[in-house]
Image (cartoon, coloured by chain):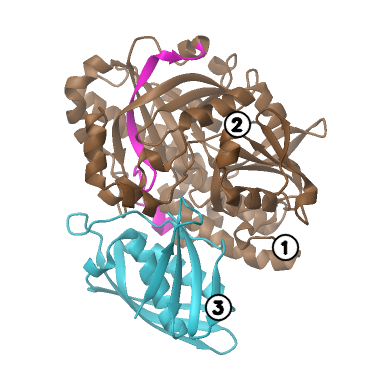
Chain colours: A cyan, B brown
Amino acid sequence: MPNFKFLEDIAIADAAFEAYGDTLEELFESCALATFEVMVDTKNIKPEQKEEIQIDDLNLEDLLFDFISELVYLKDVRKVLFSRFDLHISKNKEYSLKGTIWGEKIDYKKQEIRRDVKAITYHMLEVKRIDKGWKAQVILDT
Amino acid sequence: MQVKKIEDYIWEIPVTEKEGMRVPARIIASEKIMKEMDQGVYNQITNVACLPGIQNYAYCMPDGHWGYGFPIGGVAAFDLKEGVISPGGIGFDINCGVRSIRTNLTFEELKPKLNELMDTLYRLVPAGVGSTGFVKLNIERFKELMVKGVDWCIQNGYGWEEDRERIEQGGRIQGANPDKVSQKAISRGMDQAGTLGSGNHYLELQVAQTDKIFYPKAAKVFGIDRPDQIFVMIHCGSRGFGHQIATDYLRVFTEAMRKYNIRVLDKELACAPYNSPEGQDYYGAMVCAANSAFANRQVILHRVREAFSQVFHKEPKDLGMHIIYDVAHNIAKLEEHLVNGEKKKVLVHRKGATRSFGPGHPDVPEFYRQIGQPVIVGGSMETSSYLLVGSQRAMDLTMGSTMHGSGRTMSREAAKRRVRGYELMKSMEERGIAVRAVSMPGLAEEAGFAYKNISEVVDAVDCAGISRKVIELKPIGNIKG
């Protein structure tokens, strides 16, 4: 289950959250869902349009940065808000993320849109192992 | 952290306060603003003071608050040989800025048509997530736009010849290099020219407050010549195009820092020497975004003029819809400033800060040269905005820089808990501010109580002397993305 909470006391003009996952895949899915939750109530976004993504990086923070950046890019170019993420992360020499994501065309008549996300920042960006699984901290520019 | 008072409105954090500080940090603020200042600002502005090649001081304006990398309100200038360029010192929304436009209309003349005008503006100026503009571009035309900026708009019928000189840098900064812009940035930005965006971006109708003219000579030069005169303000930036360029180069710079052996205290301060291939590539791409933002505000102005013309059945020229000025408040620019008593060309980063060139400066258009460059400060949507002018003191004290807005004090979530969008809209309408908002939760997030008291912040820059108040503008209609 995606698991995240918004942090209100840091970078108040923007959006900050903590996300959790038992596995790296779950952690990244939590981060993705939190990003779109800033923009819309993701429960109302039907998973009807599909995109495939692949990202390779040397470390997990860069991988998360590039993954969220890709989602923000696809949101603008395809005009789609995403709500379902099926990811697979493997590690050989570097980390490799492959995944399928689903969402619905932006439609102000059907969806109550909150605000836009412009980008993910590196400010206080963190991906770390905790007792049970993984935790990340993310600040988005909104 | 030790903060020393240098004189009224000038505070300094000495280099001894943090390991690695190359220059002291200076904050411009009143005692009250200083007391209420977000603690994140102290940490962030001293991080900026550690960057290679920084000149004089790391500055923070009184509207400063916790951002990412630089604080919002941060200003820093760098040596062109030893210094760096940093996307975190500019912001993702490259050349986010404000444009102010006068009209010949009075509030009395506009009032009966306020709702019709608001509906027309709302129809002609697209706002919100995923919105697209009416200007149809292909890659070639878009590349031309990012080099020529406002000149492209004027050539294509979206502006008047006189508009150019009423915009910072003529709405066209030299050095744009479209070859250094990614395909992703192009596809993200190509259909967004003429759109407002979301968040704190807006299009506002305002009434110039005749009883709040603080500098009559400048007000006269601005064309303030009748009571309750209608003004228009446009606040937006380079949209997804700029956001993508900043994202792309943050990644380039995280790699480049290893190459150039640069260490920073916050990864968002990722940077590269200005005088390196990476630094030059980013500068060329950043200027493309800056020019596209000037063009974006220009295309929006074109639509605003059309809207007024449709509603009042007069040509925009007969309605006197001249630009007062257009300022960039998220940008890095090559400028000449005094460093150790000598004139020197430096790269000034302003993130949530405005250029404030004083009277006589050659970059100020001739018709403003006696009063100084116009400075536009946008308030929250419930509170007043201000027109000011730049000063010599800003040249001497803050490398020609001043504030940009009121500065947030409350998170967006907290604002939404305090008020619902519809309630706020109703209350604003009761107070005489018509509202058209794409997003009701988005409206609540921008409630006036989530911001510092703008009058106090404007008074701080006025008293510090880094710009001079001219007039207050009160909102009567707000279109929010």
Magenta span of residues: B186-215
Quickly name the residue at label 2.
B30
Mark 2 chain: B
Quickly name the residue at label 3.
A128
Question: What residue do we see at 33% from left, 51% from top?
Answer: B416
Q: CA distance from mark 3 to mark 2?
A: 41 Å
Quickly name the residue at label 1.
B263
Q: Is residue B383 positioned above or below B418 on the image?
A: above
Which quarter of the figure is the C terminus of chain B placed in?
Answer: top left
Dividing the picture into quarters, in which one does residue A28 lie? bottom left
Between discs 2 and 1, the one toward the N terminus: 2
Question: What residue do we see at 38% from left, 75% from top?
Answer: A3
Is residue B399 at least partly visible in the picture? no
Comparing marks 3 and 2, which lies closer to the viewer?
Answer: 2
Q: Amino acid at mark 3?
A: Lys
Tag 3 secondary structure: strand
